[in-house]
Image: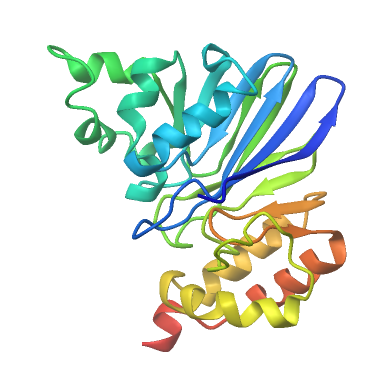
Amino acid sequence: MSQKIVKLFEEDGHICLFLTGLVEGEGIPSNQLVIVNHGEAALFDPGGELTYTPLSIELSKHISLKALRYVFASHQDPDIITSLPRWLMHTDCKVVTSRLWARFLPHLVSSFVSGNMNKGLVNRLVELPDEGAQVKLGQSHIKAIPAHFLHSVGNFHFYDPVSKILFSGDVGAAMTPGEDHEPVTNMQEHIPLMAGFHKRYMASNVACRKWVNTVRKLDIEKIVPQHGKPIFGKPHIAQFLAWFEDLECGIDLM
């Protein structure tokens, strides 16, 4: 297994770790991002059962799992959050996700607790309103950026204002097996690797444009999607946003 862990940022008690290559075989390869600020950690889109064991082992080499304050879930898909029962059982984390999915998550954790399961889970949930929110982490915060209808009707991306990294979920995703730890070097060559997925899984150009208008207001140095290569540097990011802004997808192509 070609596991890679890359330190994307480290300064004044703030660390960002990028993990790739944790799943091989028939499972969909996925990236995970971990942000630590002054001893409090957040994990983004932790994945499913296939991901949990290698991810938790790798994480424990760098942080105490007891320091994991949040698990952020961009949306509800199996490769995003089906490992939820294990994170709830083995850490004290709270789960941050859209309020639309709060009533669905109990279906994933029937084995987590017996008795009044819903009450126990409610105490571990941070439900995001549609307009987004700021979630305090250590001495900083994570911004939840609305990305609705970009693969999910209730969808969020997460921005770290310290490192200026945007974790973009399925926006920017591509299949680049074995190279997910390497940033995009040529956007024009990378676009064909993204195009088919985005045309099928994004709802419409209206949603794309709304997201781009929001993201352009942020000071972003790196975009890390859940699948494929990250996008580093403002020139590459500008090229990606220009492509995505004009993309016809979903119902535009029906």
Q: Position of residue 104 (x, y in %)?
A: 25, 38
Looking at the image, the residue that sits furthest to the front is: 1
| Residue 246 in view here | no
Q: Nearer the viewer, residue 61 or 116?
A: 61
Q: Nearer the viewer, residue 202 or 3?
A: 3
**Can you tell which quarter of the image residue 101 is in?**
top left
Residue 108 at x, y percent in the picture: 24, 34
- Does residue 65 appear left or right of residue 143 in this picture? left
The structure residue drawn at horizontal position 60% and vertical position 83%, both measured from the top left corner, is 192
Give the total of numbered labels: 0
Q: Quadrant of the C terminus?
A: bottom left
- Where residue 128 sits in the image (x, y, percent)? 48, 35
Asked whether, in this view, residue 172 is left or right of residue 218, the answer is left
| Picture quadrant of residue 11 | top right
Give 99 or 52, whichever is nearer the viewer: 52
Q: Is residue 147 visible?
A: yes
The residue sitting at 48% across, 37% down in the picture is 129
Is 216 on the left or on the right of 91, as rendered? Answer: right
